Amino acid sequence: MKKYSLLLLLFSFSIISFGQIKEKQTIDSLFIEWDKPEVPGCALGIIQDGKLIYSKGYGIGDLEHDIQITPTSVFYTGSVSKQFVTFSILLLEEQGKLDLDDKIQKYLPDFPEYDTPLTIRHFIHHTSGVRDYLTLMYLKGRNYLDNSDVDEVYELIKKQKELNFSPGEKYLYSNSCYFMLAMIVEKAANQSLKEFSHENIFQPLGMKNTLFYDDNTDLIKNRVFSYYKKRDEDGFINLIMRFDLVGSGGVYSSIEDLFLWDQNFYINKLGKGGQEIIHRMHEEGLLNNGESSGYAFALNNGTYRGLKTVSHGGALAGYRAQLMRFPEENFSIIILANRGDANTTRMSYQVADIFLKENFTNDEVENQGKRDNNKPEFVHLKTKELESFAGHYWNDAGSYTRKIYVKNDTLRYFRSETNESNLVPLSKNKFKMVNVGEDVMVKFDENKQGDHTMSFIANGGKPIIFREYEPKTYTSEELVDFVGVYYSKELNVNYTLELENNLLVLNMNETKISALNSIMANLFSNDEYGIFHFKTDKYGKVSDFRLDAGRVTNLKFEKK
């Protein structure tokens, strides 16, 4: 009991915060569930007008040794690391050592040539079509928590016979691109990304506790470890990570160091100095059709409640990170967490709500706090009218399904057994999705054949289109033709499909994964691996399938 009381005492005095601000109590209430001596949590930094006005640690950074999180604690930042890669690339361009329109093969001559040239610019803006290596490793049965050799990962990327799409045609996030950008930095600078960034970014800015971690045997002072919550019970599991690949991620840093990085965007001290390189960092890539890719130099330009934002998040193992800047308000939020259930983006917005509420200018969102008095004008539709929209809908671009059905005289938008939402009618064919934290509209249209298409529109963005389809239910006899061993040359792995309890079950490396669920004819989904598109030969027998797994598409497996 004495030990526990002492721990609480130490906990209360080990928190570091700067400045006494009137919003302190409101901010701390956002993290109250993590502000305890037995759970992981996060470090928070709030920056205003060039000063770190509030920084604090909530929870424990090392549960085995009861070490409290503070603003000096060092976290893995995940994909927040990518902006240090792009800044390195721009510094090398400034030094005349590379050009953004250089072909990848200039620096990596053994990388395969595809139908359309691939450039550094494609890699920066995620418009290359190169398949994501973390997804490939997962599909191959490799755990990213384990150590992976650079050459092994590079060989896996090079083995891919196809791209997800022709370069420049669309945007699709790919960690492979940034993994290889790190290799390009090494070739152009004649030193590792770790060395180059230290000499040209971290050391000049005084970021003494920041590095690209490319050797998992190295020690990191004040390192925070990552955790997941246990399923269906209290407590946490330890996610011990030996991952040390850099480029796609790899940066360890602290609140106090990232404050220095954030401030460099206002007055650049690096390279030749001046703001030209900062302006370049905010430039979004262009697709072949001239439209924006929506992704700058590892920065996301956006808006929140009418205010301009520049941000990027990161996630790996149980680490979660968000660095969000409101440049016109001279205001930034940094949240570094060590628990897999942390939503650092949402929490950053919540902090912004506290400090910037007087600055919000977007009328539609500004009135969110007044929704009780300004409710949308809903209409009443009879159950029969609602049922006319019920059905199964398929999104070709993302290869996923949604189900629409009626329950208790309400139209329901079904994603999974534990994830569905109510749709409330605004007109005869337009609905508002409620209790989702975003402004989401769902609209139904009918073609001449009587089939529906469904448009999903979030926050006034580009509609996501779904087409109605007829589900296919297979008998055990019909499923027999799908049974067998399928081989992928690009992954060098076998997937085995077996029939079990009238279900097609996926096995990999002699380990049962889970069942495939039929969607429509020759199309199945698997919760762990994605969408299986089966093909038949001229005799009508199943010959192969193509796998769509998010950041990897059209991956071919041939039946042995």
Image (cartoon, rainbow, N blue to C red):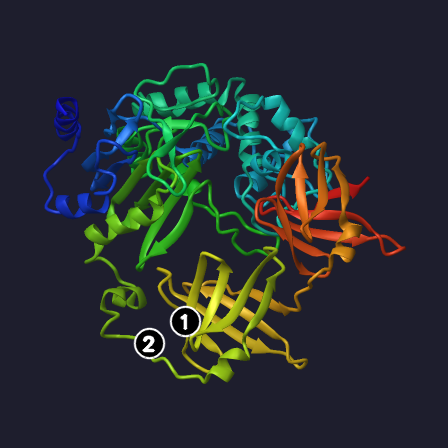
Within 10 Å of the Cα at label 1, are there few (<14), some (14-19), or many (20+) other Cα atoms?
Answer: some
Amino acid type, callout 2: Pro
- Residue beneath label 1, please? 432
Residue furthest out toward the front = 501
Residue 417 tag number = none
Q: Position of residue 92 (x, y in %)?
A: 49, 28
In the picture, the quarter occupied by the C terminus is: top right
Q: Residue furthest right?
A: 539
Give 66 or 484, whichever is nearer the viewer: 484
The front one of 510 and 211 is 510
What secondary structure is found at the residue carrying circle 1? strand
Residue 296 in sight here: yes
For image coordinates 36% across by 55% down, the residue present is 303
Instruction: Tell me the distance, in whole angstroms, between the alpha carbons under discs 2 and 1.
Output: 9 Å
Q: Which residue carries the number 2 mark? A: 376
> Does the image show residue 115?
no
Percent x, y of residue 559: 80, 43
Is 225 drawn above or below residue 306 in the view shown?
Answer: above
Q: Earlier in the sequence, mark 2 or mark 1?
A: 2
Q: Residue at x 66, y 30 (%)?
A: 156
